[in-house]
Image: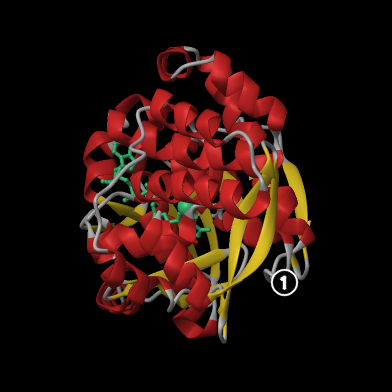
Amino acid sequence: MKKRTYKFSNSSVDYYLAGGISHLKEITEQKNTIIVTDDNVYRAHEKRFKNWKTIVLKPGEEYKVQRTADSIIEQLIGMEADRKTTLVGVGGGVITDMTGYVASVYMRGIKFGFVPTTLLSMVDASIGGKNGIDLGVYKNIVGVIRQPAFILHDMIFLNTLPSHEWENGFAEIIKHACIKDASMFRDLETGSLAKYKSGKKAICELIQRNALIKTKVVQQDEFEKGDRKLLNFGHTLGHALENQYDLSHGYAISIGMTYASRISRQLNGFKDSARVVYLLEKYGLPVHLEFDRQKVFDVLKMDKKREKTEMNYVLLEKIGKGVIRSIPVAELETIIKEL
Ligand SMILES: NC(=O)c1ccc[n+]([C@@H]2O[C@H](COP(=O)([O-])OP(=O)(O)OC[C@H]3O[C@@H](n4cnc5c(N)ncnc54)[C@H](O)[C@@H]3O)[C@@H](O)[C@H]2O)c1
Ligand SMILES: [Zn+2]
């Protein structure tokens, strides 16, 4: 099985992107491993969990909270997990975030790895070492940055992925294209959701290309002092909308990217906001929402990207080139209310 190792500031991560879950036992010792997954993944792929100790969680973002972390920890204690135990998150971003978080605090930190099963978690959530949970409307407000030991892909999981989750994944792929890769943006413009769903080679290549874009950004700036902030394109407003309006992550950031493109036009002379909107729509993503501006702004201003009275907002200079602009919170309030 092909392995590539990527170095981060104080650890390295083994990527097996052309792997397959049947190889998991070659990567981690079965008797010292506990898998964390959710009910949907478990039911759709039960046979793949055979002979593995497994903790099965209820699916959904609403369970990405401390209460669930406590319940996993209680189960780990019950299973006598110790410092030699490796936790493996097999699931979407909720599961990988939760697994990385619990593994980072259980006994002050044990080893963990990921088998992402959604498009979104393959290209985004499983990469970069951010592992967090939500509190109320505040997304990922509690967490750590700690890299997994390995990431293993298996395209077989995509066979059972609901349509809506494909769209969610494409939101992050389009984000990567907007901030870093104009040539991938053009490929997406000529491609389509149907083409990627049916073309095994095309989706494999697209996933690997995106996993690499994110990996490179994180390698250069693991602790988010600069360039890593670009990955938040569409996320400042997106996160504020996500929990308040019960939108999925991809849908929320699609609306966030639409507004960020318009703000880019206003503040940065960005000329291609229509192309961004068109591409999002082409991949089945929403680009408009009637929302309560004041309520959303009140959550938005608590964003982790705020520094006192300024907010670091990711804008586009051109397709493929994201930039970070510091916008006074008061000015941002006016912009959001007038958009
Ligand atoms: N850590 C990071 O850097 C990072 C980056 C992006 C997103 N995230 C987080 O990721 C989460 C979103 O990820 P997601 O969209 O993967 O969410 P998710 O884990 O909720 O998965 C989406 C849905 O698909 C189901 N599912 C997963 N794999 C399946 C499969 N193969 N077949 C059938 N059903 C399947 C799940 O049960 C769930 O209902 C959010 O919590 C977000 O904050 C984290
Ligand atoms: Zn995201």
Task: Specify the quadrant that holds the C terminus.
Answer: bottom left
Task: Specify the quadrant of the image occupied by residue 178.
Answer: top right
Task: Locate the N terminus by quadrant.
Answer: top right
Viewer-proximal residue among 227 and 111? 227
What percent of the width, then of the height, locates residue 71?
25, 75
Q: Name the residue under label 1.
A: 225
Q: In x, y percent, where is residue 11?
A: 74, 66
Report the side of 244 relative to 51 (left or right): left
Taking the spot 25% from the left edge, 57% from the top edge, the residue there is: 291
Residue in the image at 44% along x and 32% along y:
280
Establish if 328 lies above or below 39. Answer: below
Residue 113 point in image, percent of width and height: 54, 56
- Choose between 335 and 199: the one closer to the eye: 335
| Residue occupying image coordinates x 49% and y 52% | 234
Residue 201 is drawn in which quadrant?
Answer: top right
Q: Which of 264 and 87 is in front in this view?
A: 264
Q: What residue type is labelled 1?
A: Lys
What SS does tag 1 mark? loop
Asked if residue 283 lies left or right of residue 308, the reply is left
Residue 34 visible, this angle: no
Quadrant in which residue 133 is drawn: bottom left
